[in-house]
Amino acid sequence: MRATRFVAGQDIPVRAIGRGMLVLGAVLAAAGCASAPAPGAAAVPPAEAAPPRPASISAADLGLYRSMDEARAAPTEEELKVVASSKKLLGQAPNAKVLVKGRQFTLDCIGTVCAIYYELGIDVAKDFDKYPGNGVNRLYRTLEERKALHRDRYPRTGDVVIWDNTWDANGDGDRTNDPRTHAGVVLAVDEDGTIHYVHENLYKGVVIETMNLLKPTVALDESGKRLNSGMAIATASGGAKPDRWLAGDVFQAFGDLLGIKEDLKVSGGLGRAELRLAGP
């Protein structure tokens, strides 16, 4: 995988200096002109030493959650388990009911995310009772409290995705004031930044679709490759799309659920039998 390097600077090779300048410098040094001021002349203060250059630039220095090398590293065994768990749900109908390790999930958007991680022994909804709102908002607050939210353009396999304004959740007719209304899970990221994610599509059920945060308003590239799938739904079946409807254009944040897995371990029986907290 390609990595990004930060180059602090380059030394100027000696051969780039004119030969005449080298000879002149030698003559001046031999005459003592380079080391001693003329009688009565003011002494020139020594130049201050330049501050040392940093050996490297960290992800934190750049405002990133992970360095580019970390983002581009091969998937871990646990991340591959997220992919395997997701594949088990592909093709399920919208709002289908499934059993995962003895617990029933309804495959709306948040139920799909919860079912994927429950297979790995992670209870995404473990602390949902602490927060208000729908399931996506509760997921967002769970991640926010643990400082596991980020907005890097290159996420990792296993990160969750949260979107805003995917439907008119509050019913006021305004499609721009409905934060945290949908969620999915990152499965892979292409070199060009195209993210493949799994989620519950309101019409198709559990599917894999795409998002590209480098070109968030572009549906297809010049070759016909799908960069951003449709995400925000019309106000009615067959109705006009909202102004911002592509996945990259309504993106809110990623969340590193695997990074906080110890906080969300499955414990104490089956927990609630049903989980319907989201909507479309």
Image (spheres, rainbow, N blue to C red):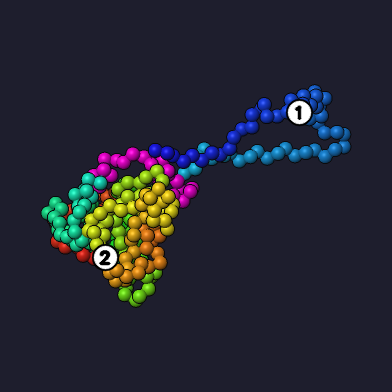
Which quarter of the image is occupied by the C terminus? Answer: bottom left
Quadrant of res 51: top right
Query: Which residue is the site of mark 2?
Result: 280
* Residue neighbourhood size for the residue with mark 1, other residues' Cα within 10 Å, grouped as few (<14), some (14–19), many (≥20): few
* Tag 2–tag 1 contact (CB < 8 Å): no
Q: Which residues are magenta?
A: 59-82
Label 2, label 1: how far apart the Cα atoms are:
74 Å
Earlier in the chain: of badge 2 and badge 1, it is 1
* Residue neighbourhood size for the residue with mark 2, other residues' Cα within 10 Å, grouped as few (<14), some (14–19), many (≥20): many
Q: Secondary structure at mark 1?
A: helix
Q: Is residue 153 above or below residue 94?
A: above
Q: Is any atom of residue 235 visible in this view?
A: yes
| Side (left or right) of 53 relative to 103 | right
| Side (left or right) of 86 relative to 42 | left
Q: Which residue does the image show at 79% across and 26% down from the upper left?
A: 24
Q: Nearer the viewer, residue 120 or 223?
A: 223
Q: Nearer the viewer, residue 197 or 80?
A: 197
Residue sitting farthest toward the front: 223
The amino acid beneath tag 2 is Pro
The image's mark for residue 21 is 1
Q: Secondary structure at mark 2?
A: loop
The amino acid beneath tag 1 is Met
Residue sitting farthest toward the left: 102
The image's mark for residue 132 is none
Q: Which residue does the image show at 26% across and 59% down from the upper left?
A: 201
